[in-house]
Image (cartoon, rainbow, N blue to C red):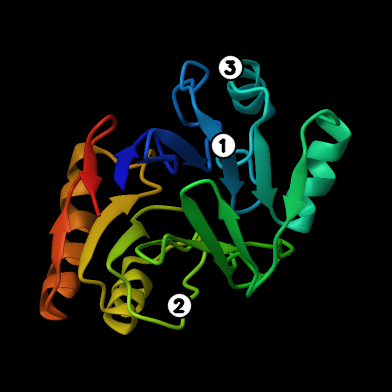
Amino acid sequence: MKITKHGHACLELLESGERILIDPGFYTESMASVDNVLAVVITHKHDDHCFEQQLTGILANNPELHVYGTDEVRERLSASMPELPVTAVHHGDFYEVGPFTLEFFGDLHQEIHRSIPLIQNCGVMVNDKLYYPGDSYTQPDRSVELLACPSSAPWLKIGDVMDFIAAVKPKRSFATHNALLSDFGHELNNGRIAMVTEAGGGSFEYLRVGEFTEV
C-alpha cells in the first residue's frame, strides 16, 4: 500500500489501482483531480478534516464516492451535501472497501480546553498496517506497523505525543497534522517523535507534502 502525505492531515492511500483519502480538509491542497477514489474517511467534523469544498471536488471526479465518518460528520454532511452517502462509524466497526479494510478506534476528540465542548473522533486502522488516530491519543488494541502521528495542534502537547508513541511502539512512524508548524517547529517536533519511535525499536520518516512511503 502506497501512502502519500498531503497538506495538513490528509493521506492518500493507493492499493491495486484504487484509492482512499483520509481527512481532506481546509488546510489541504485541492484533491479534486484524484481519481479512482472509493471512499473518504473523516475522523471528525472540524474543518481541517471535514470540508465540503474538498468533498464536492472529489465527488465530481468520483461519482461513486462513499464517506465514512462519525455521527457528527454524517449529520453535518447530510445537511450540506445530501447527495453524498455517509456511513457513521463507531469504535470497533470494521468495513471492507475494495482492496482496503477499515477498522475504527475511539470515541472522542482530545480536549482543547475545558471551555470547549468535546466532539466525536474515530481513529482508523487501514489494512491492519497503517494507524491514524485523528485528533486523539487513542491506542489500537494491537501492534502498529506504520503510525501517522499528529505533530501539531491546539490540543497537542509534544510530551503527550511522546507518551502516546511510547505506548503504541510502532515499527515505523511519520508526522502528520502539521500544517501550522514553521520549519523550526517541524525540526523540533519531528525530532521528539523520532527519538521515542527509535527508543521503541522503530524508525521515523519525515514526509513533506506530495512525498510517499509504502507499507
Mark 3 near mark 1, Cβ–Cβ under 8 Å?
no
Q: Quadrant location of the C terminus?
A: bottom left
On the image, numbered disc 1 is attached to which residue?
A: 38
| Nearer to us in this view, 147 or 195 | 147
Mark 1 near mark 2, Cβ–Cβ under 8 Å?
no
Instruction: Tell me what residue is drawn at x 19 percent, y 65 percent.
Output: 192
Q: Is residue 205 left or right of residue 14?
A: left
Labels 1 and 2: the sequence-earlier one: 1
Q: Is residue 121 left or right of residue 102?
A: right
**Does residue 37 appear in this view?**
yes
Badge 3 element = helix
Q: Categorize mark 1 by other alpha carbons within 10 Å: few (<14), some (14-19), many (20+).
A: some
| Nearer to us in this view, 132 or 15 | 15
**In the rendered image, the vertical position of residue 107 relative to residue 83, given as above or below:** below
Which mark, by number, is residue 61? Answer: 3
| Nearer to us in this view, 28 or 214 | 214
Percent x, y of residue 117: 74, 63
Labels 3 and 2: the sequence-earlier one: 3
Labels 3 and 1: the sequence-earlier one: 1
Which mark, by number, is residue 139? Answer: 2
Q: In this view, does 31 lie to the left or right of 200?
A: right
**Does residue 45 appear in this view?**
no
What is the tally of numbered marks visible in this picture?
3
Instruction: Tell me what residue is drawn at x 55 percent, y 39 percent.
Output: 48
Percent x, y of residue 6: 37, 34
**In the rendered image, the vertical position of residue 208 relative to residue 175, given as above or below:** above
The three-letter code of the residue at mark 1 reads Leu
Instruction: Tell me what residue is drawn at x 58 percent, y 17 percent.
Output: 61
